[in-house]
Amino acid sequence: MGEYAIQMLGITKAFPGIIANDNITLEVKKNEVHALLGENGAGKSTLMSVLFGAYSADSGKILINGNEVTIKNPNVATELGIGMVHQHFKLVHNYTVTENIVLGREPRNAFGILKLKDAEEKVAALSKQYGLAVDPKAKIEDITVGQQQRVEILKTLYSDSEIIIFDEPTAVLTPQEIDELMDIIRKLKQEGKTIVLITHKLKEIKAVADRCSVLRRGKYIGTVDVDKVTEQELADMMVGRAVKFEIDKSPANPGEVMLSVKNLNVKDANGIQKIHDLSIDVRAGEIVGIAGVDGNGQSELLQGLCGLLPVESGQILLDGEDITKMTIRQRIEKGLGHIPEDRHKHGMVGDFTLSENVALKDYYTDRYAGKYGMLNFSEMDTIADELIEQFDVRAGQGHATKAGSLSGGNQQKVIVAREISLSPKVLMIAQPTRGLDVGAIEYIRKRIIAERDKGRAILLVSFELDEIMNLCDRIATISKGQIVGIFNAGEVTERDIGLMMASSEHKE
Ligand SMILES: Nc1ncnc2c1ncn2[C@@H]1O[C@H](COP(=O)(O)OP(=O)(O)OP(=O)(O)O)[C@@H](O)[C@H]1O
Ligand SMILES: [Mg+2]
């Protein structure tokens, strides 16, 4: 028996205009946790999709447990004992947990009747063995994102995968869920599994990985033993230059109140009240952060403000004007910008090009007016080109690239670029750096501060306390749909805020 579970040798995979994987070699030892690190668009998801049989490589070979294999499709990968937990989950929402897990390999009796009971028992046993708490009979639409991820993990265990690939599993999780996942990964290792973990969070690599391979712009850079390097060394290796974790910023110079929220009440889509009598002001030239445990009304607050959810009662003033009852478009025209939490649902259209996505919110304005009532397409392309350049969006075909084909982090950069370029008076931002690499995080944070210094009022929601501490001038803690404390930055420590959040913890 050889030393390696996976050997990918000289893998090359090109897409139109870009070589996503350029002669990459990745060797993963049996029973290790192997981290895969690299900038947004470096080629990590592509490489793992080749391993999982979702893409076929242009050249190179793959060995599993020392034997050369051809992985034509994901079914072959499953037979070889390879499972993948995808960056964007692939679950059927109106099916139960068990139905999703057995999908495509349903156990049937001699008469072809589904034996769901047996499957439910096997799922329950696996979930107990690995500490993956989830109700086998619950519907996917009724469980949290963290639980959905457990379903994806159970799916790989159900088909006896010995190798499990995690593609950015923590990007969608709250800090609490991340700790739980780290424990699950340790448990999987104990049970003898081999794990590949893609993540941008160096802390996580330090916490669970044995070795780490780094990719940069489609090329293999090297592999290191995790306990022999610091987080800073990993970051520098991945970006190819020195990265700064702390952002320099001068004290805020707040002006007039730009956003004033008074006694707001908002119900979620199911009619459950999530925002209770909430009031908050944001001034021009300051960043106000909302800190809190996920599920305490952060999403509903932003959705109520931007018009995605109706307001039951209360008032929203933007630069002194009442926008409470305005349509979404009217609010945008009045100067409300929004970088949404769910970039696929509310941020972009995957089948549109980058030019179209950049113009999505103001295509009908003079900015894009061409001759004879037509859109000025060349202006659209020019504006998109400028943003691609400024925000370092890695796109194979420039402004003509379809947004859906971008890597996860590059999609996020496009949305941030568009919202900032619209120069809103008030910019609401949810999880701005989710899924971004450390270099991109540094840039986006600098841009947010630059926008503040131009006099924009910024309301920031983030689950990452260090992001809140790094960026905000004032910090409000939210609990059960109410602001329970508001502080000037510098007057509180990360620990104070953390304790306050924990003591008022509330989960759905
Ligand atoms: N189906 C596709 N069609 C065209 N281009 C693609 C496709 N999939 C990926 N690419 C391109 O290949 C490159 C590598 O993308 P990949 O998704 O592998 O990056 P990544 O390292 O996973 O990045 P991230 O950290 O942002 O998820 C990117 O430039 C991306 O635009
Ligand atoms: Mg990816």
Image: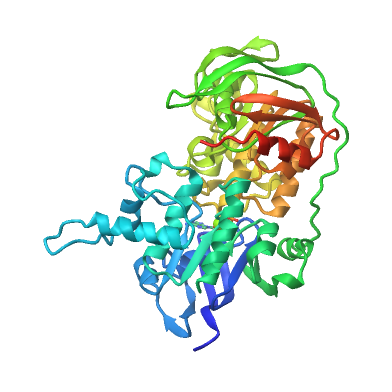
Q: Is residue 247 left or right of residue 76?
A: right
Residue 82: x %, y % from top left: 43, 70
The correct choice, above or below, for 268 with respect to 127 in the image is above
Q: Is residue 346 visible?
A: yes
In the image, residue 131 sits, relative to residue 321, either above or below, namely below
Q: Residue at x 58, y 40 (%)?
A: 381
Report x, y in % for residue 124.
Answer: 37, 56
Quarter of image, res 4: bottom right
Q: Residue furthest right?
A: 250
Ligand 1 is located in which of the four quadrants?
A: bottom right
Q: Which residue is at a point 33% across and 53% down the rendered structure image? A: 98
Q: Quadrant of residue 185?
A: bottom right
The reply to whether residue 395 is visible in this rendering is no
Q: What is the x, y in percent for residue 491?
A: 85, 33
| 342 or 333, nearer to the observer | 342
Residue beneath the point at 60% across and 39% down: 415
- Residue 291, how many percent across, how many down? 68, 35
The residue most toward the left is 111
For the residue pair 374 and 285, the one nearer the viewer reads as 285
Query: Is 225 or 384 nearer to us in this picture?
Result: 225
Identify whether 84 is placed above or below 278. Answer: below
Farthest residue, direction bottom: 1
Q: Looking at the image, what colour scheme do you see? A: rainbow
How many numbered circles does the render carry?
A: 0
Q: Residue at x 56, y 33 (%)?
A: 359
Residue 103 is left or right of residue 168, and the answer is left
